[in-house]
Image: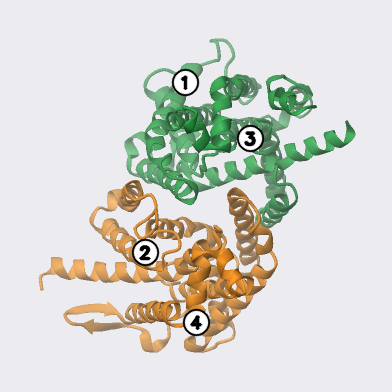
Chain colours: A orange, B green
Amino acid sequence: MSDLLTTLATLTFNGFVFGAILFLISAGLTITLGLMRMLNLAHCAIAMVGGYLAWLLTTRIGLNFYVAVPMAVLGTMALGYLLERTVYQWVYPASELGQVLITIGLTFIIVSLANLAFGGQIQEVRVPDGLRGQVKLGTLNVSAYRLFLLGVSALVVVGLWLGLERTDFGARLRATVDNRSMASCVGINVDRLLSITFALGCGLAALGGAMGSQLLPLEPYYGIKYLVLVLIVVSVGGLGSLKGSAIAAVLLGVIDTLGRYYVPSIGGFVLYGVVLIILLIRPQGLMGRA
Amino acid sequence: MNKAAQGFSSQRLGWIDAALLVAALLVWWIWPLYLPLAVNVIVMIILVMALDLAMGWGGIDALGHAAFFGIGAYAAANFALHVTQEPFIGLLFGALVAAVLGLVSGLAVLRARGLTQIMLTLTVATLMLELANSLKSLTNGDDGLIGYKIAPVFGIFEFSLRNSTAYWYALGVLVVVYLLCRWIVNSPFGLSIRGMRENPIRMRVLGVPVTRRLLLLYTLSAAFAGVAGALSAQVTLAVGLDSLAFVISANAAIMLILGGAGTLYGAFFGAILFVVVSDRAAALDPSNWLLGLGVLLILMVRFAPDGVYGLLRRFSKKDG
């Protein structure tokens, strides 16, 4: 294969990995938006909490990566559940703008607490030794860890799809998204469903935050810095559509990576230009219902 | 007060206007050291008022007014560098350029509602930031645009760190913008805008050209935000990429809600409270003031969703 093609293929691979991380982080936001009609701007800060937890468990306590990440995910889910039962009860009845402001306030609180606890320097969750270095994928040399990331994300996608389409819980969730009051009429405990779903979304975000710290390094302002990107994924994909979010995340990841490499002078401009065009043609997003 | 009288009460200048004017004089009289901060407050009041026109009065969910603020600032700075240093013409030029951007982006932004609208405004602002970052000849990139001068106001009052010209100039601009905004919201056009916010379908049925009027409102809002940016460029003599940053858009929205949206007065209360508190808090404890702001925001939305102005109104109603 010529050098040009190899570069293109490597870049596309990296773009896919970036997209996979974006998807993990934005999946929970998409679900809460579709399900609760709530714009949770603190979602990215929750992903950061997951990342910091994993970092804490691996570096300070010295746990194995494969133990630390699931523990961080569970810890973040517990936190998410707790927050949903308390602060978010104030968010639900607020106006759209009120929701934006409360959750931005929550983001500020998490950001400054992270700053207090961990300081301003950039942190990275240590990659396990077995995943260091490169592996050969056909004629391509790719990072083993990134391949692992892609694999885990694919498993998550399959798991989400099975969970939504093939389980009782998924059926109840879909019913609630379609018609909340009807769902509660047929005996679905909507409040409990919301809490569990919210916690699950937080867990996915934590997974993205913990595993993606190589691409999106941990720092206290993580929750604000990457928020715009995550929001863009959700709105380009279409509110409440997981499939849309997945497509949008991969699309934007690839476009961003290619754009920054081939036309570095206008770097980020490419990404936002594409986003603007997509939203102009389809204001409801790629997979959104009009 | 009956309902009809209440609806038109925003037409009369009242005790709040008088109190604000007295406060402006007191600042100059008692705290001359804080005049630069006061100028900063005035710039923010104008920006928040511009946002109030679009968001509070028009019901347009805008989280990207940094685009207009920043482009107004860069326009005014470039104007002073290349055309003339006359301050008022520079201000108008900043407003004009921002208005053009408002008109063009409004065509896109107003097609959507709710979250998509928020995202579109956000995307426009981010695009402008990336554009400014790549057009180094106009913006000087990361280093920021400096080295331009502004001619004396009316040819007499020179801008200097030793006098208060910047303060009076900014205050004058604020008074003009405020009176213009009042006139706009109380005009027949402004009343129809209020109608559209409450029930767009009904207004359309009544034969009001809803989209065209909202576009005009958005353009006006962008122009005023451009004035705020141009003013900031003229008094600080420096424009950086941070004038286009998301933080500006978010802070403006926060100030508007703190003060009270859809009132015009909200801009004053919100900007004064936010800028002064954040300045004091940042001086005391730079890393933790965000924590306080977060708590304040949550409590504010929960217990005083209509802002400081709403609180004041509630208290004054109890008294009367």
- Which residue is identified by label 4? A168
Q: Are marks 2 and 4 on the same chain?
A: yes
- Mark 1: which amino acid? Leu
Q: Are marks 2 and 3 on the same chain?
A: no
A93 in relation to B86, above or below: below
> Which subunit holds the residue at mark 1?
B
Residue A162 percent coordinates (x, y): 41, 81
Residue A169 percent coordinates (x, y): 51, 79
Residue depth check, mark 2 versus mark 1: number of the one nearer the observer:
2
- Which residue is identified by label 2? A244
**Is residue A18 something one can see in this rendering?**
yes
Circle number at residue B92: 1
Residue depth check, mark 3 versus mark 1: number of the one nearer the observer:
3
Mark-to-mark CA distance, 2 and 1:
44 Å
- Mark 2: which amino acid? Gly
- Mark 3: which amino acid? Gly
> Which subunit holds the residue at mark 2?
A
* C-beta proximity under 8 Å, tags 3 and 1: no
